[in-house]
Image: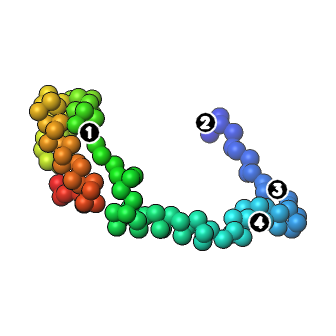
Amino acid sequence: MSGCKRKEACGTAEVDESYAKELNKFYARFDCYDFEKENGKRLEFLLNMIDGKNMGNKVVLSECEVRKTLRCLNSNKASGPDGVSPSVLKYCADQLGDIQAHLFNISLVSYCVPPA
């Protein structure tokens, strides 16, 4: 009615069975490999992290990093679930950097995120 032409229906390609089997073999090639060895290593590493045996890889946030991150907050964003606006955090970055770094590090060491 509006002068637009109808789109022609897309046809399916004619494919023989050997091509379909070749595609199946290509996409299913990962099912043939046994990842048990790699998964065992990852599991052992994670369990060592939880037990504290692998303390060499412990993440520690410095006060300088926390202050720098607080200074980079966008003041135009909305407040978080705690009701503190980003502009207050940005303005008080020098005063809050030490205590925030301490709280973050306690959270990282204890593997626990405090409730909001």
Tell which circle, 4 or 3, labels the residue nearer the N-terminal end: 3
Q: Amino acid at mark 2?
A: Ser
Neighbour tally class for label 2: few under 14, some 14-19, many 20 plus, Cα within 10 Å: few
Q: Is residue 38 visible?
A: yes
**Distance in Å between CA atoms under marks 1 and 4:** 51 Å
Circle on res. 2: 2
- Which one is closest to the eye, mark 2 or mark 3? 3
Q: Element type at marker 1?
A: loop
Q: Quadrant of residue 11?
A: bottom right
Q: Sequence-wise, which precedes: disc 1 or disc 3? A: 3
Return the x and y of residue 17 as percentages of the image width and height: 86, 68
Q: Which mark is residue 13?
A: 3
Pointer 1 residue: 62
Q: Which comes sooner in the sequence, label 2 or label 1?
A: 2
- Mark 3 lies on a secondary structure that is loop
Circle nearer the viewer, 1 or 4 = 1
Q: Are marks 2 and 4 in contact (CB under 8 Å)?
A: no
The answer for how far apart the CA atoms under marks 1 and 3 are is 60 Å
Evaluate if marks 2 and 1 touch, with contact meaning CB atoms under 8 Å apart: no
Compared to residue 60, the image places residue 31 above or below, namely below
Disc 4 on helix, strand or loop?
Answer: helix
